[in-house]
Image (cartoon, helix red, strand yellow):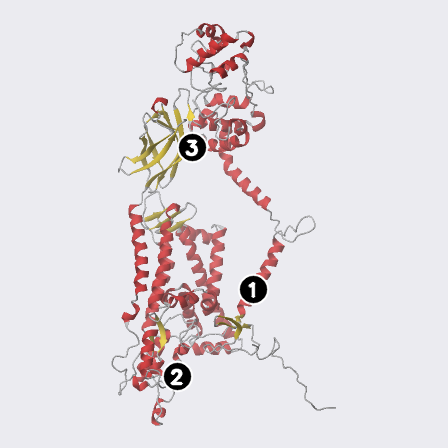
Amino acid sequence: MSDKHIDEVSGVVTTGHEWDGIRELDNPMPRWWLWTFYATIAWALAYTIAYPAWPLISSATSGVLAWSSRGELRTELSAAEATRAEYAARVAELPVEEILADDTLRQFATSAGAAAFRVNCVQCHGSGAAGSPGYPNLNDDEWLWGGTAEDIRATIAHGVRFSGDDETRYSEMTAFADILDREEVATVAAYVKSLSEGGDPAGTGADIYADNCASCHGETGKGEPSLGAPDLTDAIWLYGSDVGEIAAQIRTPKHGVMPAWQARLGETTVKELAVYVHSLGGGQ
Amino acid sequence: MTTTSIEVERHDAEAVNSAKIRQPLYAARKKIFPKRASGQFRRFKWLVMIVTLGIYYLTPWLRFDRGPHAPDQAVLVDLANRRFYFFFIEIWPQEFFIVAGLLVMAGLGLFLLTSTVGRAWCGYTCPQTVWVDLFLVIERAVEGDRNARMKLDAAPWGARKIALRTVKHAIWIAIAVATGGAWIFYFADAPTLLSDLVTGEAAPVAYMTVALLTATTYTFGGLMREQVCTYMCPWPRIQAAMLDENSLTVTYNDWRGEPRTRGAKKALAAGKVAGDCVDCNACVVVCPMGIDIRDGQQLECITCALCIDACDAVMDKLGRARGLISYATLADYNTNMAIATGGGAHAIDPSLVHKPGGGLADGIVPFHLSRIFQPRVFIYFAGWALIGVALVYALMVRDRLEVNVLHDRNPQFVVLSDGSIRNGYTVKLLNKIPEPREVTVSIDGLPGGAMSVVGIDRAEGAAVDVALDPDRLKTLKIYVRQPRELVDGRVQTFRFLVEDAENGENAAYTANFDAPE
């Protein structure tokens, strides 16, 4: 055991370790390897001096280079900000229609708008902007308050029925529970439903409709964007397409409220949001 | 007092630091002063060196006209724009499998080479070998050949030694800078980058890369040399598994060389046997690894074959047959050894393999060429060639116009006011040629389907013309709608078609159209 074992072929002493008859030669390491090892230690020490490393009681040494991951992020963000600045400035000064006409600006605004949408709008309209009962689907081609890019911008900027903005979109449908009895409501609901299905417009509900509803929704039921009165002839129903749901909406209408975003997000972001929503496919 | 001997147990033990088993932990590098060799292998190595260095230094300066929309550098790795140019081939990142295939070919090629001609890569074409050779040329030119260099090394530091060493290292560093510099020219337009480098306007990363490669070239080629091969490179270890008894290695044919003697005539006169080896050590002094090939095949040997040249020159001078040191396979070596020793019955008797008048006996050759053509050589070659053919085929049939389609998943579909169903798609058009072109995008196979493209054509239609920038990807947002009454099932499939009207090149993508239940 203790006697040194010398490998026959190489004449080199082995370490004494043996695996299935294979022994490990105990050749000396090259000297430069040792120096390389020392160099890595020196490098590691220098590194801990240059960069944050040594733990202290409540923090750590900050390093002589004053590097930090937050600082690096700041640098990257400001670099990104700088590349965006040129486009952002043009978005700020041009009206939305002109942004749409410029291919590059439109793409820039769409991306920026998509990012802003995910932070501010998805809570109600959904991450795909598909909405849910009471919250309009922004992908389709029905617009309560108008579907041009400028209409959409104004709606986002000032909100809908939002008490904190003087220019907010405002309308309120009469609660017909006090005016029409249940049977009349059911009749006119059936009539409204038939409008959307291209059914018989001369039904018994037509008279009730003409007396009570046509002033806002139009004689043919096409709606009126300036009043926020929905088109009743199409296939899209904010509060449900069932006759019962339509009747409920006639008796005691629900009114959605959307905040005004201009004061909070600024004009540029609102324009970008408008371009994004317009690009979802239904913009006019 | 009794004198009965007391039994004391003797322990089988030894101090852990006993002088008997103590070894030095570290050994300093022994300086090697390779002598200049000349001969056929040396000439071949000069040729390989000129060709490989020429390829390395000059390739970035070759021009290749690709028209006004692409760089005119023949070989260019354009990292910023994610393009790789090689003469008439242009590779996009998604075609990187071609480069991966080349790497697999390089690996298999190395196996193929090693299983036939041993460590030919190490001995002739490895950058480490080539640059060490180049650095040795400088060293010899400045300090002289082996003896002069050893004398200079042993001499005390004086004006001459300082001057010679300064000149040598200065030239080495100049070569190292040129080497590191040449590397970065593969990654940017070479003439522009050179002027930027000189005027100090190049990117910091360019200078850092040059500095790093200068340092490694100078250190590895000038200072560390054989240490890199012996201690740093994994290949000497791997080659042990690659070689077999039918692989060519540089071999000292001791079946004709032993017993070696410096006074052959005297030994013969005294009735002793004498082999061809005159123990002149010519093979040792030319070895860049500083080893003695007569000790047998060893890890350090890079099979540069310079010892063959050195020995052949000596054999020529003595009027003996060449090939005392030669390329040989272990199998042939064993056959010859068996002849020389009478099948192991006695010590080597060179007269058994020699003709009486000198020269080798009939039928005795260091190796048979047929030996190296083993089945595995053909398997490696077949694998290597198969990948090569597959890559060429892939290059020939690859599309230069492609379309990729991503179906909107949120929402999957939208019901429009007239009841029709709309699906959204992100369509990516890849124009992979460095020319602008006009393509027509249309849909096919969706009854009543109509499409509109955001930002390009607000009017709905069946097809839209799109201008593609040269060598760029264009992303379109396309909406497809279908009247409710024509919707046929929850999921329908249809195709996006893209066609270049000018040359008929086209691409298609099968997409899904989702509708409510």
- Residue B485 in the image: above or below residue B470: above
Residues marked 2 and 1, same chain = no
- Residue B408 in the image: above or below residue B19: above
The spot of residue A103 in percent (x, y) is 42, 31
- The quarter in which the C terminus of chain A is drawn is top left
The spot of residue B66 in percent (x, y) is 32, 46
Give the residue furthest to the right: B1
- Left or right: B448 in relation to A159: left
Q: Which residue is mark 2?
A: B279
Q: Of the residues shown, which amino acid type is indicated by label 3?
A: Asp
- The quarter in which the N terminus of chain A is drawn is bottom right
Q: Which residue is mark 1?
A: A37
Answer yes or no: is residue A198 visible: yes
Q: Chain of mark 2?
A: B
Q: Of the residues shown, which amino acid type is indicated by label 1?
A: Phe
Kindly state the secondary structure of the residue where label 1 is placed.
helix
Answer yes or no: is residue B173 visible: no
Kindly state the secondary structure of the residue where label 3 is placed.
loop
User: Gap between marks 2 and 3, in whole Å?
Assistant: 81 Å
> Foreground residue, B74 or A9?
A9
Q: Quadrant of residue B53?
A: bottom left
Of labels 2 and 3, earlier in sequence is 2
Q: Which residue is mark 3?
A: B408
Residues marked 1 and 3, same chain = no
